[in-house]
Image (tube, rainbow, N blue to C red):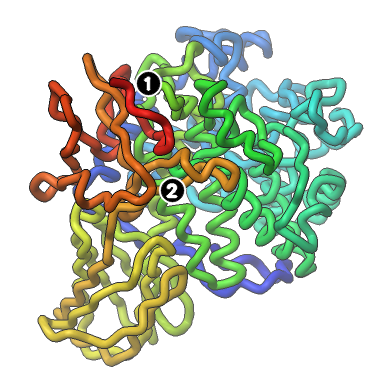
Amino acid sequence: MRDLSGAARGRVVLGEFGYDGVRLLPGRFATQIARAREVYGAIPNDDILKGFRRAAGLPAPGNDLRGWCAKTSGVIFGQLLSGMARMSRATGDDALRQKAIALFQGWKETLGPEGNARMRLYEWDKLVCGLVDLWEFADYAAVRPVLEQTLAWAAKTFDRSRRLADDYDFWGAAPGGTSEWYTLPENLYRAYLISGNGAFKDFADLWRYEDYWRQFAETSELREVVTAHAYSHVNTFSSAAMAYAVSGDKRYLRICVNAYDFLQKTQCYATGGFGPDERLMPPDGRLGKSLDVYAGHAEIPCGTWAAFKLSRYLMGFTGEARFGDWIETALYNAIGAALPTESDGRTYYYGDYRISSGLKQYYWHEWPCCSGTYWQTVADYHNIIYFKDAEGLYVNLFVPSEATWQHQGQRVVLRQETEYPESEATTLKFDIQSPLRFKLRFRVPGWSSGAAVTLNSSALSVPAVPGQWATIEREWAPEDCLIIGMKMALRMVPVDRQHPDRVAVMFGPVVLAQDEACCRRPFAMDRNYDLTTRLIREGTSLRFRLVDTFTERHTRYLQPFYDFPAFWPYWVYFDISAPPLY
């Protein structure tokens, strides 16, 4: 994570790039970012500010946004500022930075007496994030007095019931619109660390979710869990992570580690998404059963945002590579497989993994919460590919990109060229002025059986343990070329322990879905099948043709879930013990 101020007491092992020094090269993720920049950068400022101006009794030109933002854009306003600040820092896009500043200044004119933001706690939490990001990533310290002013208003205004969520009140909502109050500490602590103002820390301390967090303090093997709101109850662990950053109390770090392990073992689908019907599931098989019952299995942009943050915090605090696995899984199969937000506010919200076939489709209201987190999440791509420390560089993701940093006073540029995951290999090229010794580490994914490494066409013997960093320490020369090959294979991944025969099919980090267009049905298989005899890869793509389909009239295929467009039917999960539908 970023280099925290002297007020921080939690130990940081790996440093983030802080949206500075990482550039995406042409590829699917650069294309996704460019499209998002086009959509979000083109929203008229007057449209975004219209509801705030109207509420303040000011002239309000422009058009109302639709859906969730029909009255005011408050539900995503802070997220818009956040994404613009992070994206402008990452890409050097000054026009985006200036747009964010103009929006802040326009909104500031609508601020009520004594800092009254006219927001519920839910919206104000996002506002704090956006203002802190403007300060930190857009270098715009003019937000400070406004941030402090609106903090004083919030401290006098918000209901402090801090109700614990239960199976009936899955948000923990209290009077006055204080649902999801337990996500507040994260950005308040960030405000404290960047400002040094203890009032932010005091207010953050008030909203710690101790009643929920404590069950994870000693174990990840929970037998029961409240069916609480999934996204916000995963997002609250980022508040626990920042509680560790500020206090140095390792109990909060244990909570985050155990929560991560619990989520991976009991809550996540093969895509990395979680939360059928927006709820956490008791670890008793209801996750697998959800594929029969629901269509909305995971809030994709919001859930990926929470997954990225928790994983990134844990990688920074522990230095462990294994936490990068969730980032990779969600990158390709959740946010990377999402439909893009459209200029009219249509947003991909729920992942659909029904056992009876699913569809990718837009949410029924425009500009929902996921439209805000979509923007933040794609901006975050720049901050999850690489990490660094005093010894060198860590390669977390195999994405076409370029990283620039300083090591021992010398500028180092690493260029990563790859077609991964369509290709098992990624090529790393170095641009340095003179030979320089440092450690290069790369994450060996937990699903992999190892890695093959060559340097300048010569094989290197590099221990590569799944779930750990592989390390190469040497004196690197200008124009060195390192090629890393991950060993990928087809595999079946059960949805949970109680449903070992309800599986998704994966190849490397990629979930494969079956094309379910007209006159097709899910292919039949047995756990004893060798998948390589049933699925034949065609060419260099990740499209697999089904063979041995008895009287099948049509050729059937499995291909990456991220390749499916809107409203095209597919199967993600298969019951391998079920009789074929002949």
Q: Secondary structure at mark 1?
A: loop
Residue 88 % position (x, y): 39, 45
Q: Mark 2 or 1, which is nearer the eye?
A: 2
Q: Which residue is mark 2?
A: 493
Image quarter where the N terminus lies is bottom right
Q: Secondary structure at mark 2?
A: strand
Image quarter where the C terminus lies is top left
Instruction: Give the tally of numbered discs.
Output: 2
- The answer to whether residue 127 is left or right of residue 216 is left
Callout 2 environment at 10 Å: few (<14), some (14 to 19), or many (20+)?
some
Which residue is pictured at 31% across the width and 84% down the height? Answer: 462
Which residue is pictured at 72% across the width and 23% down the height? Answer: 119
Q: How much space separates mark 2 and mark 1, taking CA atoms?
A: 21 Å
Q: Which residue is mark 1?
A: 359
- The answer to whether residue 158 is left or right of residue 478 is right
Q: Find residue 439 and report its image quarter.
A: bottom left
Vertical placement of residue 339 versus 361, above or below: below
Residue 452 % position (x, y): 24, 76
* Amino acid marked by disc 1: Leu
Which residue is pictured at 74% across the width and 24% down the height? Answer: 120
